């Protein structure tokens, strides 16, 4: 299945998945309407194909509606989930993560403009999704998640590129 959803920065700090993930995720945000929150779905590929959801800039409610349309409300099994809006707190919530079964979360941002990914969004992924966080840059906004003790405690992994921008192999 390939879903394509088209469509408040936070300062980074100490990584604390339990506390950060528990924070309220807005069901929608002030930007949940208009051109940056629309959604489009692509046709489903044959069974056995790599299944990836590209969240683009869609907010969680938009993605949830798209996933429900293709799955009938059952959790969707994905090989990878490209986290919406570079890991903004407004685009990742518990309901969205509950609606997918995924072991690879792709976070694409250098953090320069909006300081993404947000601590809350990554903490939610770790707490409610788990698996491996794939970052396309190592930055001051995501390197905190590469802490060995934190990864062991919460049973997740991180991957960073040897140089900026990476090609992902999801074997």
Image (cartoon, rainbow, N blue to C red):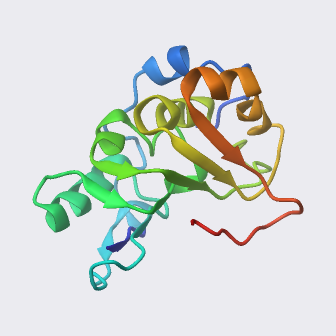
Question: Does residue 117 appear anywhere in the picture?
Answer: no
Q: Is residue 44 above or below residue 81?
A: below
Foreground pick, 48 / 143? 48
Residue 17 showing in the rendered view:
yes
Q: Residue at x 56, y 25 (%)?
A: 154
Quadrant of res 37: bottom left
Q: Residue at x 43, y 39 (%)?
A: 129
Q: Residue furthest front?
A: 171
Viewport quadrant of the N terminus: bottom left
Which quarter of the image is occupied by the C terminus? bottom right
12 over 132 or under it: above or below: above
Residue 170 location in percent, x, y?
57, 65
Horizontal and vertical percent position of residue 5:
38, 67
Identify which residue is drawn at 88% across, 59% down.
Answer: 162
Quarter of the image holding residue 143? top right
Picture coordinates of residue 160 (x, y %)?
77, 52
Q: Residue at x 80, y 50 (%)?
A: 112
Q: Quadrant of residue 123?
A: top right
Q: Is residue 162 left or right of residue 83?
A: right
Q: Residue furthest right?
A: 163
**107 horizontally vs 61: left or right:** right
């Amino acid at each position: 299945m390939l879903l394509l959803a088209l469509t408040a920065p936070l300062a980074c700090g100490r990584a604390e998945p339990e506390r950060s993930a528990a924070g309220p995720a807005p069901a929608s945000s002030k930007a949940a309407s208009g051109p940056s929150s629309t959604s489009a779905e692509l046709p489903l590929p044959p069974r056995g194909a790599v299944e990836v959801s590209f969240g683009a800039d869609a907010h969680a409610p938009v993605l949830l509606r798209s996933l429900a349309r293709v799955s009938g409300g059952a959790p969707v099994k994905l090989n990878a989930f490209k986290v919406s809006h570079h890991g903004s707190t407004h685009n990742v919530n518990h309901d969205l993560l509950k609606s997918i079964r995924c072991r690879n979360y792709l976070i694409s941002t250098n953090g320069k403009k909006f300081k993404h990914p947000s601590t809350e969004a990554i903490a939610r992924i770790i707490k409610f999704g788990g698996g491996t966080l794939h970052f396309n840059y190592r930055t001051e906004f995501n390197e905190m998640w590469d802490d060995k003790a934190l990864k062991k405690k919460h049973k997740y992994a991180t991957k960073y590129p040897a140089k900026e921008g990476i090609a992902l192999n999801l074997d």
